[in-house]
Image (cartoon, rainbow, N blue to C red):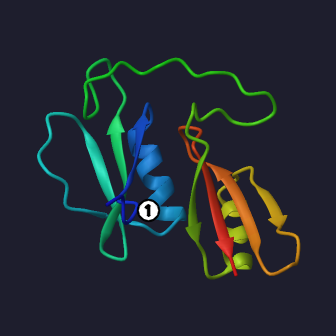
Amino acid sequence: MGVQALEHVTVRCGQLRRTRDFYVDLMGLTEGMRPDFPFRGYWLYLGGVPVIHLVEASDTAGAWGREKAPPAPREGEPDTGAFDHVAFQGDDFEGMRARLTEAGLTFKERVVPGGKLKQLFVPDPEGVLVEINFR
């Protein structure tokens, strides 16, 4: 007995609407039904599953009411605390690269050794690194 699938990732947001727009307008997720929690947030869906949960960062926001921890510095990379990145499967490398460029976002490109996988890496407005894989 163990885990069977990844359900979702929750991002605590100082820029809630901007982060929602990043995932909806640029990444193509859709905003959907969210329970009536006592804190602001969004559930963002991919293929009918709410894979990204956004919660407003405040002294009492989030599932456990935790205070937002100060970021730990990590030289040369955007800081996401202990959480490093979230990855999505993409279907149009050139199209996504153009969308990110048009949005004025800084991103990195990588071709995995062997040449069968291209990747784009872009931080969301909260600094969480988003990896998009193109096979």
How crowded pointer 1 is (Cα within 10 Å; few <14, some 14-19, many 20+) is rated as some
Secondary structure under the numbered disc 1 in the rendered image: helix
- Image quarter where the N terminus lies is bottom left
Q: Residue 54: x percent and y percent? A: 36, 45
Is 4 located above or below residue 35 in the figure? below
Quarter occupied by residue 50: bottom left
Q: Extreme left residue here? A: 36
Residue at 35% from the left image edge and 58% from the top image edge: 2
Residue at 86% from the left image edge and 78% from the top image edge: 115
Relative to 63, 57 lies left or right: right
Relative to 55, 90 lies left or right: right
Q: Residue 22: x percent and y percent? A: 51, 54
Relative to 79, 25 lies left or right: left
Q: Residue 67: x percent and y percent? A: 36, 18
Residue at 38% from the left image edge and 65% from the top image edge: 5
Is 102 located above or below residue 90 in the figure? above
Quarter occupied by residue 111: bottom right
Residue at 82% from the left image edge and 69% from the top image edge: 112
Amino acid found under the numbered disc labelled 1: Val
Nearest the viewer among 127 and 116 is 116
Is 102 located above or below residue 53 in the figure? below
Relative to 128, 92 lies left or right: right
Q: Which residue is mark 1?
A: 24
Q: Residue 94: x percent and y percent? A: 74, 78
Quarter occupied by residue 91: bottom right
Q: Extreme front residue here? A: 1
Is 97 located above or below residue 103 in the figure? below
- Image quarter where the C terminus lies is bottom right
Nearest the viewer among 71 and 2 is 2
